[in-house]
């Protein structure tokens, strides 16, 4: 009986901890322009639906940046950000629909790219493995997702792990 109660309490504690981590510590004022400057990636001038978020963590912070482009422009933008000898890949093992990462794009009102399959490509890069003017000021490694969510329109998602101590966004 005591063992069962222990497992129920520990399960609830873990569930509450995960919920708290997912909802906690988002800084206000993280604009797309500010996040673009912090992570060192430019946003194309014709990008639409620009969104950004900044979450303070215990061991590291996380920056989110997302915008849409016409699909041909999205491909051209991402091509030089793909390390030589690699390519963005399809999501062959998607997360379940209720997936909630600690620093998720759901905070920005977007679907989590890890749950998407149709039209999704994903990859990543670091400052030392891409040769692109778009990344000349790249400060952190990036997870990147490219999702053609309707024919001819692609949403690009970036998630950056950031060393703690970055100056908080304006207005926080």
Image (cartoon, helix red, strand yellow):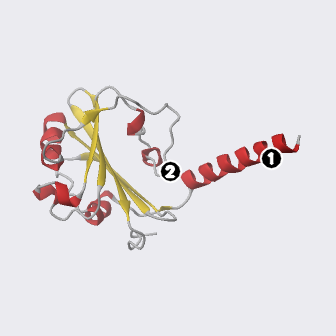
- Image check: 121 left or right of 166? left
Quadrant where the N terminus sits is top right
Closer to the N terminus: mark 2 or mark 1?
Answer: 1
User: Judging from the image, what secondary structure is the residue with disc 2 in?
Assistant: loop
Q: Which residue carries the number 2 mark?
A: 102
At 29% from the left and 57% from the top, the residue drawn is 141
Judge depth for marks 2 and 1 and give the one in front: 1
**Residue 50 makes an appearance in the image:** no
Estimate the x, y position of residue 68 in percent, counting from the top left.
Answer: 26, 42
Q: Quadrant of residue 163?
A: bottom left
Please say whether residue 119 is visible from this viewpoint. Answer: yes
| Quadrant of residue 62 within the rendered picture | bottom left
Give the residue at the far front of this rendering: 3
Measuring from the top left, give residue 41's x and y in whole percent.
22, 58
Q: Residues within 10 Å of mark 2 (few under 14, many from 20)?
A: some
Residue 152 to residue 127: above or below: above
In this orientation, which residue lies closer to the viewer: 23 or 34? 23
Residue 153 versus residue 167 in the image, above or below: above
* Coordinates of residue 47 in the picture (x, y in percent): 21, 47
The residue closer to the viewer here, 38 or 160, is 160
Asked if the residue at tag 1 contacts the one at tag 2, i.e. Cβ–Cβ closer than 8 Å, the answer is no
Q: Position of residue 118 (x, y in %)?
A: 32, 25
Q: Give the labeled residue for mark 1.
A: 6
The residue that appears at 41% across and 41% down in the rendered structure is: 110
Q: Secondary structure at mark 1?
A: helix
């Amino acid at each position: 009986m005591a063992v069962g109660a222990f497992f129920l309490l520990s399960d609830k504690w873990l569930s509450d901890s995960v919920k708290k981590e997912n909802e906690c510590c988002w800084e206000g004022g993280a604009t797309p322009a500010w996040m673009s400057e912090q992570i060192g990636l430019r946003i194309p001038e014709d990008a639409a639906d620009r969104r950004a978020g900044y979450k303070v963590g215990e061991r590291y912070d996380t920056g989110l940046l997302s915008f849409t482009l016409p699909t041909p422009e999205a491909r051209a933008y991402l091509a030089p950000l793909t390390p030589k000898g690699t390519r963005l890949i399809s999501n062959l093992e998607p997360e379940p629909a209720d997936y909630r990462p600690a620093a998720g794009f759901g905070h920005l009102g977007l679907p989590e790219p890890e749950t998407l399959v149709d039209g999704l490509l994903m990859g990543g890069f670091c400052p030392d493995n891409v040769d692109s003017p778009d990344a000349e000021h790249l400060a952190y490694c990036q997870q990147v997702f490219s999702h053609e969510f309707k024919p001819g329109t692609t949403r690009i998602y970036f998630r950056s792990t950031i060393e703690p101590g970055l100056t908080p966004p304006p207005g926080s």
